[in-house]
Amino acid sequence: MAFKVVLAYSGGLDTSVIVPWLKETYDAEVICMAADVGQTGGLEGLEEKALATGASAYFGEDLRESFVREYIWPALRAGAVYGRKYLLGTSMARPIIGRRQVEVARRVGASAVAHGCTGKGNDQVRFELTFQALAPDLRVIAPWREWSIRSREEALAFARVRGIPLEVDETKLYSRDENLWHISHEGGPLEDPAYEPDEETFLWTTAPEQGPGEPEHLELGFRQGFPATVNGEPMDPVRLLETLNEVGGRHGVGRADVVEDRLVGMKSRGIYETPGGTLLYTALQELEQLVLHRRSLALKDQLAPRYADLVYEGRWWTPEREALDAMVDSLMRRVTGSVRLKLYRGSARVVSRQSPNSLYDEALATFGEDGVYDQRDAEGFIRLFGLPLSGSVPPLAEAGSGADAVEEVLRELSPVR
């Protein structure tokens, strides 16, 4: 029986070269699996390209709906943001692609899976943790950790010698990753963190200063924290996200310039465009502020970075993620309502919010006369609230008066050196 390997295939330079390399190195039958997660062009032309490079079979998988429902929405509802600014677009896509790769491997009776990730990046970890969790018996082949090719130029030479048809722009400056949630830009001049990217870098978003001269209002509706409507119109997840990407991109919303800590230990710099995601995060957090009480908000703020680390590190297929999802589901049961945003030249400002489960009580919050709140009750509350402070520092009256008293107290409070 032939040694079969399923390759996560994109049709780019790396995976196009990997197909013949696997055949030559392992005498393998290579099955290419390509996933449509919302990238421009989808799966168009990939089957012909895969077969032309030597693949014995090709599987094209439309994963867009599942990607949004099962991966993007959970991370959004958890409030996951990595490194203060990164909304995890690439990170979320790898577990679903890896899962489908395993499913294809089972279907064709393959004994190995392969990917085109480099040994410096995070994606190798995300793919391989998925394989370990879902199919630990499958062998993993990572050509960039094995072969002698060390540059883009060497990969192109390898392809040309073997007559591999490629449509490659050798002047391409950046390495890009694109799906329904975002597009990222890395490499080239961006490797200098002092370099300011020019407008040619950006593909999804208009320069904020070049945006429409008039603001645009946008109302986003949520049901239990799940995005549901745009301007009152119900939309399926894919269409909703595509709509918000277009609207946000038109107004220059969602750009992020991030110096991040890769899981493998180095810092890297990336430019991210996430227009629809930025609108959704802004609106959902505001709705939570209206509906959740203080301690629930604090709990959610604690779990959000933990969820972000989990996604970034590729630990999607874990009991930890399932437990966090259960906690988020509990917290989000009442997060239903709508938020109105005002979009203008790079900003998305909240201008109104409403919910049938709002905890905001105008009768309590008003500065005007009310018959609900007895302000005299505050005196007893403050006395009890401040009870632990009694005797915790020397009273100023016992330390003298004026500037000398202040200096004496500060000396007593300062740490011993």
Image (cartoon, grey):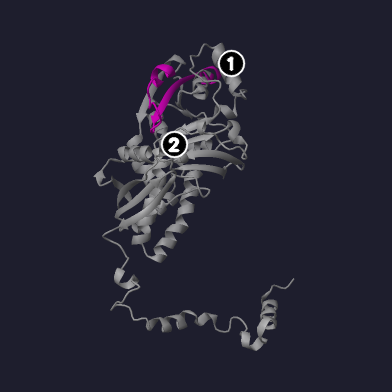
Task: Tell me if mark 1 has few (under 14), some (14-19) or many (20+) residues whose alpha carbon lies within 10 angstroms of its own.
Answer: some
Q: Amino acid at mark 1?
A: Ala
**Quadrant location of the N terminus in the rendered image:** top left
Evaluate whether residue 325 shows in this view.
no
In the rendered image, residue 336, in percent from the top left (x then y), is placed at 29, 55
Q: Is residue 39 magenta?
A: yes
Instruction: Name the disc covering residue 241, or none.
Output: none
Location of residue 277 in the rendering, given as x and y in whole percent from the top left corner: 40, 44
Q: Is residue 305 above or below residue 190?
A: below
Residue at 55% x, 13% y is 160
**Residue under the point 46% across and 41% down:** 208
In the image, residue 259 sits, relative to residue 333, either above or below, namely above
Mark 1 vs 2: CB contact within 8 A? no
Determine the CA span between mark 1 and mark 2. Answer: 37 Å
Q: Residue at x 31, y 77 (%)?
A: 369
Q: Which residue is mark 1?
A: 157
Q: Which residue is mark 2?
A: 206
Label 2: element kind: loop
User: Quick one: quadrant of the C terminus?
Assistant: bottom right
Q: Judge depth for marks 1 and 2 and give the one in front.
A: 2
Residue 242: image x %, image y %? Answer: 34, 37
**Nearest to the observer: residue 3 or residue 34:** 34
Q: Residues within 10 Å of mark 2 (few under 14, many from 20)?
A: many
Q: Is residue 352 above or below residue 228?
A: below
Q: Which residues are magenta?
A: 21-50
Vertical arrangement, residue 121 with respect to residue 401, above or below: above
Is residue 327 magenta-colored? no
**In the drawing, does residue 388 fall left or right of residue 218?**
right
